[in-house]
Image: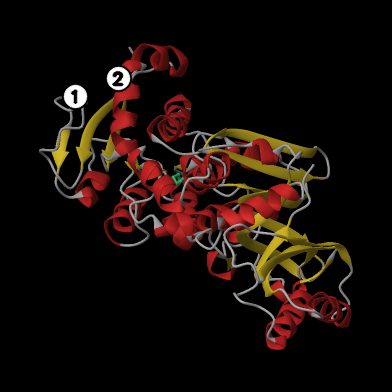
Amino acid sequence: MTEALRVGIAGLGTVGASVVRVLAEKAAELQRQCGRPISVTAVSARNRDADRGVDLSGAQWFNDPVALAKSAEIDVFVELMGGDEGPARDAIKAALDAGRHVVTANKALLAKHGVNLAETAEKKGVLLNYEAAVAGGIPVIKTMREALAGNSVSRVFGILNGTCNYILTRMEAEGLSFEDCLADAQRLGYAEADPTFDIEGNDTAHKLSILTSLAFGSKIAADDIYLEGISNISQADIRAAASLGYRIKLLGVAVRTDSGIEQRVHPTMVPTQSVIAQVHGVTNAVAIQSDILGDLLLVGPGAGGNATASAVIGDIADIAKSQPGFQHGPVFGRPAKELKPYKKAKMRSHAGGYFIRLTVHDRTGVFAAIAKRMADADISLESIVQQADSGLDADVKTVVLVTHETTEAAVRRAVEGITKDGHLTDKAQVIRIERAE
Ligand code: HSE
């Protein structure tokens, strides 16, 4: 029988334990597909005694993930510890240096060190696979790296964080509080170890930075992403959006513009009828627009043990199927040395429609003053409506504006002016609108 592919796994949390369990449950099927068995021969985690509900008796235990990564007894090092520095980085680097293939779900680490690690993997002729790092079980890395070869991508955007989509979906459908929905997402194993990474948009930004590099052949630039999370989104926003035919989603968007690449993560209004607005709960979606294929939308489970394990196991299976001496393709779809420097488009130049929710004193001249500030900033309005809100005092009203396409700079100028006029009782809420079919 062909020799087994020997897998060493570091990190046995929700995802690591799921990978071990599914590899055991699907051992016979994977062997048929790959032409050889896949065997977990070594593991490492912080706590040896934790009950993970999986059988680890056949695997050698390592206290030190770096020692596991370098072990001559493994062919593939699977990193599921998380963290963008420290043990995760040291272990992946050690594995690549030692000529081991690497599979990782670590988007934060790839966002920071992906290009360097890719250079090492390519020099060593080994694979660095990371399907699980972006959009959970959706095979978006394989799609962009392999299936879209030759396409010139103009925009990639999507719902990349299951926790945020789960929270926004339940807030809208059930009128629940943000905190209750977050607690459920944590209980279900969707959230990051530090959930502020989910709700403040960092996790989406890490994933977006990887997609941007694949889309535009540029170096990863996670620090150049405009970032806003969902912690400021209230039931008032959700209700106002619904009344105007929009739904709020946390989107990551990367667009090629004349002045460079625009990367942004923020709560976004999408038309209620659009396909992406129908993506609910922990489900993720990635939309890719390219010249040869046109519009592509991938939708699927974005977080949780099984979804992530599915992507990790697909990556391991690719390695099991590869022949000795096979020349592996580049990590980011083109040789890491050929990735171009990232050219950032300024956020102030962003062009699009805007939703602006103002809470104002109900007195004469307020509407006129708002309209004047808009006109002075050269902003054309699609609609301006006053809404009564049962949660507000009788002499306070909500005014919601939707603009035609304008620029970020113009909106900031107008909102600054409205704020100065002194009619607001609360900070203005500004949410960008994204074109979506
Ligand atoms: N915390 C992430 C999410 C897990 O909610 O999408 C998958 O990366």
Q: CA distance from mark 2 to mark 1?
A: 9 Å
Seen as rendered, the residue at the extreme front is: 394
Amino acid at dot 2: Ala
Secondary structure under tag 2 reads helix
Residue highlighted by disc 1 = 55
Q: Is residue 4 visible?
A: no
- Which corner quadrant holds the N terminus? top left
Task: Give me the disc on residue 195.
Answer: none
Secondary structure under tag 1 reads loop
Task: Give me the disc on residue 24.
Answer: 2
Image position, residue 116 (x, y; %): 47, 61
Amino acid at dot 1: Asp
Q: Which residue does the image show at 20% across and 42% down from the upper left?
A: 44
Q: Which residue does the image show at 10% across and 38% down from the upper left?
A: 49
Image position, residue 303 (x, y; %): 45, 39
Marks 2 and 1 close (CB-CB < 8 Å): yes
Image position, residue 114 (x, y; %): 48, 57
Q: Quadrant of residue 41?
A: top left
Residue behind label 1 places its C-beta within 8 angstroms of ligand 1:
no
Residue closer to the observer: 150 or 435: 435
Image position, residue 179 (x, y; %): 41, 52
Residue closer to the observer: 268 or 145: 268
Report whether 331 appears left or right of 401. left
Q: Residues within 10 Å of mark 2 (few under 14, many from 20)?
A: some
- Tell me if residue 343 comes above or below residue 274 in the rendering: below
- Which corner quadrant holds the C terminus? top right
First in sequence, mark 2 or 1: give its number: 2
- Tell me if residue 183 comes above or below residue 117 in the rendering: above
Report whether 53 appears left or right of 23. left
Q: Which residue does the image show at 27% across and 43% down from the upper left?
A: 11
Image colouring: secondary structure
Q: Which residue does the image show at 47% across and 40% down from the upper left?
A: 132
